[in-house]
Amino acid sequence: CGGNLTAPSGGPVTSPNYPSDYGDNDLCEWLITVPAGSTIRLTFDSFETEDGYDFLVIYDGASDSAVELSRLTGDPQSVDPITSTSNVMFLRFTSDQGVTLSGFQLSYTSYATYGK
């Protein structure tokens, strides 16, 4: 699961098996790269993971050494759009053993930042 996403806009991006439950011990990583001079906006259609154990972490850059924008976990919730400061964003989904739920579905769009 995971991969490199390079289209200016894309999706859906989903947890494994969505809308069925994801698996135990999943590790998925996505690198989103849009044209230089743009930012990335993630929009969530749904989100539900085991609270405190299964996470979607979103980084403002090309790897997990970048600034963490958001660490999402928990019951069904509405997630506000998340926007990067550059043209690259890194996402990592991890699950432990035990409870599995439907996970998440999101899409992304790039926005040109020229002249700002």
Image: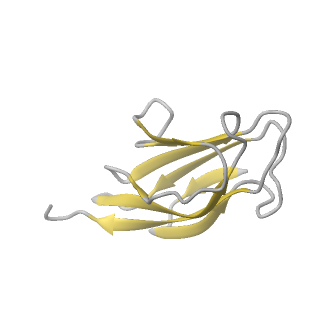
Residue 114 lies left or right of residue 69; in this view the side is left
* Residue at (65% x, 56% y) in the render: 76
* Residue at (81% x, 58% y) in the render: 17
- Indicate whether 3 appears above or below 35: above
- Indicate whether 51 appears above or below 3: above
- Indicate whether 22 appears above or below 45: above
Residue 68 lies left or right of residue 107; in this view the side is left
Camera-nearest residue between 106 and 75:
75
Of all residues, the one furthest to the top in this rendering is 65
Camera-nearest residue between 53 and 30:
53
Give the colour scheme shown: secondary structure
Camera-nearest residue between 58 and 8:
58
Residue 7, percent from left and from top: 50, 67
Residue 82 figure quarter: bottom left
Of all residues, the one furthest to the left in this rendering is 115
* Residue at (78% x, 33% y) in the render: 96
Camera-nearest residue between 96 and 99:
99
Residue 99, percent from left and from top: 83, 41
Residue 116, percent from left and from top: 15, 61
Q: How many marks?
A: 0
Residue 38 figure quarter: bottom left
Residue 61 lies left or right of residue 99; in this view the side is left
* Residue at (46% x, 29% y) in the render: 65
